[in-house]
Amino acid sequence: LRDAVQIDLYAAEPAPMGVAGPSFAGIVFLGLANMVVFFENRKRRTAEKALTEVNLGLEQKIEESTQELRAVNDTLNEAGMERETLLQNEQKARQEAEIANRLRDEFMATVSHELRTPLNSILGWARLMKGGTLDDEQYNKAVTTIIKNSETQNRLIEDLLDVARIISGKSELEIVELDPVEIVSHSVETAKPSADAKKINISLQIGDSVNGHSIKGDRDRLRQVFSNLLNNAIKFSPENTRIDVSLKNENGLAEITVRDAGMGISREFLPKVFERFRQDSSGSGKNGGLGLGLAIVRNLVEMHGGTVSASSEGANKGAIFTVKLPFASGNGSN
Ligand code: ADP
């Protein structure tokens, strides 16, 4: 515009001779033009300012929208994760239910098999006895086998009843003051005949610091604990091996360990060894039993305020079972 004005000024008619500079009309026009430029500039600055403000507002809006989107995204992610967790939980529950079902079916099959095996033997020998054709030696063998199988069956039924009592919370203890040496020695003596049959030597070591200290517990139930551990040690050991039992005072607790040199327990099975109905199926087949003995051991030990743990260096490296029981109050400190 300024250029246009200048062109206009110079393009105006030449001033008459004697008059110096532009005419009055030119000056007014120049002033007006300057004003127009001034106002145009102001308008432009105002527009620029408004534009900057609009820009700022837009940026702020974009920032706000971005944050909102981020929040929505986070919520969606959380919802996705929650859904994933729910899905995983549902899958885990389904797997556990399937395992429980499988274990129950296996257990039913095992119970039938384990109860039928001794019964078949009892029936067979009883029929032979009734036939009256057995000589004295065979007759004696028949009676011994019938008694042995009846005892086996009796133990299986006792175990089943024990577990039923544990599940229904009805197992009760008759607590008296006991000598731990007597309890452990009794279980060792009871296990000796079946150990002898496999030429397994059981040694019992008793630490001096135990003498004179008593524990409170149910005599039969504690004997049952150590008998179960010893029977397993014998059952899962090959002939001509040894079993070491020790009883000592370890930090004010009666600590009993049963260590065998048998087939050991695999790393995978070790955490499940005390669960009921569990038997390690990875070995060379079924070993007899219902998979209840150790579940009963753990329950009884815990009812006595104690703990039981198992360790093994792996297959064929033997197993160690450790029971810790509190001494009767005022007892046990060295
Ligand atoms: P059961 O002896 O009737 O099978 P348990 O509850 O006593 O039931 O034992 C569960 C499983 O633990 C056994 O089937 C066996 O696989 C394993 N087990 C227990 N004791 C020993 C042991 N001393 N050595 C190796 N494996 C053992």
Image (cartoon, helix red, strand yellow):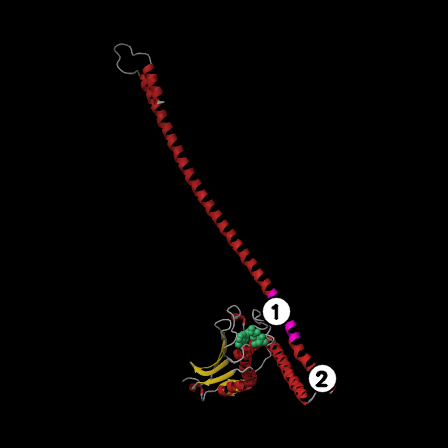
Q: Is residue 175 visible?
A: no
Name which residue lies at 33% across and 21% down. 30
Residue 266 placed where, x, y %? 52, 70
Residue receiving disc 2: 128
Does the numbered disc 1 mark a residue whose Cβ is under 8 Å from ligand 1? no
**Tag 2: amino acid:** Leu
Task: Answer with mark 1 or mark 2, whichever residue precedes in sequence.
Answer: 1
Name which residue lies at 34% across and 21% down. 3
Q: Nearer the viewer, residue 85 or 324?
A: 324
Residue 120 placed where, x, y %? 68, 79
> Is disc 1 in contact with disc 2, using a CB cutoff of under 8 Å?
no
Name which residue lies at 34% across and 20% down. 5
Horizontally, is 92 left or right of 38 in the view?
Answer: right
Residue receiving disc 1: 103
| Residue that lies at the very extreme toward the right in this rendered image | 131
Residue 162 placed where, x, y %? 60, 79
Q: Main secondary structure of the magenta part?
A: helix
Which residues make up the magenta segment?
Answer: 98-113
Instruction: Check the image and report above or below for 96 versus 31.
Output: below
Q: Nearer the viewer, residue 18 or 197?
A: 197
Residue 79 placed where, x, y %? 53, 54
Q: Quadrant of ligand 1?
A: bottom right
> How many numbered circles are shown?
2
| Residue that lies at the very extreme toward the top in this rendered image | 17
Figure quadrant of the N terminus: top left
**Tag 1: amino acid:** Leu
Instruction: Check the image and report above or below for 95 versus 6.
Output: below
Q: Tag 2, which secondary structure?
A: helix
Instruction: Check the image and report above or below for 135 versus 15.
Output: below
Local packing at callout 1 (Cα closer than 10 Å; few below 14, some 14-19, many 20+) is some
Horizontally, is 12 left or right of 325 in the view?
Answer: left
Instruction: Check the image and report above or below for 204 versus 107.
Output: below
